[in-house]
Image (spheres, rainbow, N blue to C red):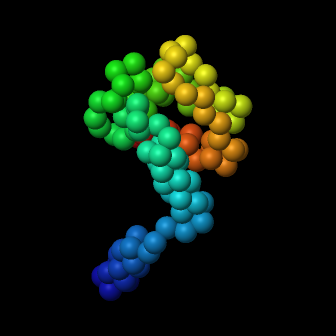
């Protein structure tokens, strides 16, 4: 019994340690993407998990993955996003920003 108790305590200790490595980098990238979304997109789009878009024509970010694969937005984000509606300004992000924004959009799929 004692070995089982020690094993369980070890598992609990590991679970309580902060995430490191790739998981931490991914979380940081998602947070950077969330900041970009709030700064550049929230004026028109709902950028969080709930709420309506301030501009009715602007789809909520949490629904974008149902329209197309968000992984494919990298090129458009770095070359300049243009859409069919005239009220959306053109945005250009550097490659790291585009990756961060895509990571955030993917996090909204969960």
Could you say which is closer to the camera, residue 84 or residue 31?
84
When asked about the image quadrant of residue 7, the answer is: bottom left
Could you say which is closer to the camera, residue 34 or residue 87?
87
Q: Residue 14's x, y, as percent? A: 44, 74
Residue positioned most to the left? 51
Q: Where's the N terminus, which quadrant? A: bottom left
- Does residue 49 appear left or right of residue 80 in this picture? left
**Residue drawn at x 51%, y 24% as measured from the top left:** 88
Q: Residue 69's x, y, as percent? A: 56, 27
* Residue 103 visible at all: no
**Residue drawn at x 39%, y 19% as measured from the top left:** 57
Q: Where's the C terminus, which quadrant? A: top left
Residue positioned most to the bottom? 2
Q: Residue 64's x, y, as percent? A: 46, 27
Could you say which is closer to the camera, residue 19 or residue 5?
19
Q: Residue 77's x, y, as percent? A: 64, 34
When asked about the image quadrant of residue 44, the answer is: top left
In this figure, what is the number of numbered marks? 0
* Residue 85 visible at all: yes
**Residue drawn at x 70%, y 44% as measured from the top left:** 95
Residue positioned most to the top? 84
**Residue drawn at x 34%, y 29% as measured from the top left:** 53
């Amino acid at each position: 019994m004692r070995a089982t108790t020690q094993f369980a305590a070890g598992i609990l200790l590991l679970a309580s340690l902060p995430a490191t490595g790739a998981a931490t980098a991914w979380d940081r990238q998602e947070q950077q993407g969330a900041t970009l979304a709030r700064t550049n997109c929230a004026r028109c789009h709902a950028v969080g998990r709930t709420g309506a878009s301030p501009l009715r024509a602007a789809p909520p970010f949490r629904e974008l993955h149902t329209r197309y694969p968000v992984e494919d937005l990298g090129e458009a984000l770095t070359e300049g996003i243009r859409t069919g509606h005239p009220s959306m300004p053109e945005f250009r992000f550097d490659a790291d920003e585009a990756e961060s924004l895509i990571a955030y959009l993917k996090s909204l799929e969960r």
